[in-house]
Image (cartoon, helix red, strand yellow):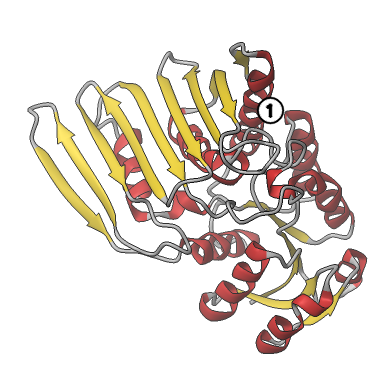
Amino acid sequence: MINVAVVGLGWWGKHVCNALHANSSSLKVVRGVEINLDAVKDLASDIGFELSKNYEDALMDENVEGVILTTPHSTHEELVLKAVEAGKQVFCEKPLSLTASSAKKMVKACSDSGLILGLGHERRFEPAMEELARMVKGGELGTILHVEGHYSHDKFAPLASNNWRGSKIDAPAAGWTGMGVHLTDMLISMLGPIKEIRAICEKRVLDLPSGDVVSTQFSFGDGTTGTINVVSATPFYGRFAVYGEQGWVDIQEMAHPEDVGPTHMTICDKSGKRDLKVFEFTDTVTKNFDHWADAVQGKVNYRFSDTERISNVAVLEALAKSTLTGNAELVDN
């Protein structure tokens, strides 16, 4: 069991604490860090962990072996580097950072110190996605020609206009940092780095400066093309499709921690025959954390490579730039 401090106890930080307390056999929350202590005192009491306003308290606590960062994206670099200096293991929510140069600095610091830098991309652990990754890497779909993704929900609709999740600085390109980064992470893990991306971002109905719709087109180094769309003002919807010369796979209604339900995978082979597989909901948030804990303890190789850690942030940076320039932008992998 690894003792951890969860830093930032907003909506997602609370979810992480509750999920680990209820389901994890590898991690124990022993401290929480939050500016507004009154808002989380009941959570701390129910789970049984100490509270403090200062991050340094967690870093100086000998009982804390690792930190889980669920804070605004622009704070990640500073908090990761401080944790490395203190010799703590680090799990950082996505996106790791907002620029490729920042991500490279964070990755190098952890690597040089022998620490495992965990990432909050739990969608890689969805059974349907794991099956698709196996098929792609095993060549069952032949040469991959095109990929499509759509990930939308309305979780941000109630947010005030000054909430950091709608900030152009902390969350550029509408809901991309909350949703789109999950899809590019999975694609990069299957197909390698994205080479070039073009994006359009619009502000339609939400009172959030960063907007509520973003649409992208991109290409990989081998010529595979793709498109991803994200909407922050519509009920939950998820779709992910990969098209190859030998067939295609279409995954619909991907699960969300607050939208529990089955995932449907349609597989079509070259003859046109279609098979349907249904995957029941699983707690991928805890699976991701437990996998990181196993890697920290040397039981498994961590699923995320340094190239993947950096490349997904580089895509975000290029995408955000494209929404401003209107041009296709090269990705600084």
Residue beneath the point at 69% across and 81% down: 43
Q: Residue furthest top?
A: 327
**Secondary structure of the residue carrying numbered label 1:** helix
Viewer-side residue, 39 vs 223: 39
* Residue beneath the point at 81% across and 79% down: 38
- Judge left or right: residue 138 versus residue 6: left
Q: In which quarter of the image is the C terminus?
A: top right
Q: Which of 155 and 186 is in front in this view?
A: 155
Provide residue 270's location: percent of width, then percent of height.
13, 26
Image point 55% across, 62% down: which residue?
Answer: 299
Q: What percent of the width, then of the height, locates residue 62?
A: 86, 75
Image quadrant in which the N terminus is located: bottom right
Residue found at x 55% / y 50%: 121
Mark 1 nearby-residue class (10 Å; few <14, some 14–19, many ≥20): many
Quarter location, residue 135: top left
Residue 148 location, quadrant: top left
The quadrant holding residue 295 is bottom right
**How far from the left and from the top, in percent, is residue 321?**
69, 21
Closer-to-camera residue (113/50)? 50
| Residue denoted by label 1 | 317
30, above or below 178, in the image: below
- Check the image and report above or below for 204 versus 278: above
Amino acid type at mark 1: Glu
Q: Report how many numbered discs are placed on residues in the image.
A: 1
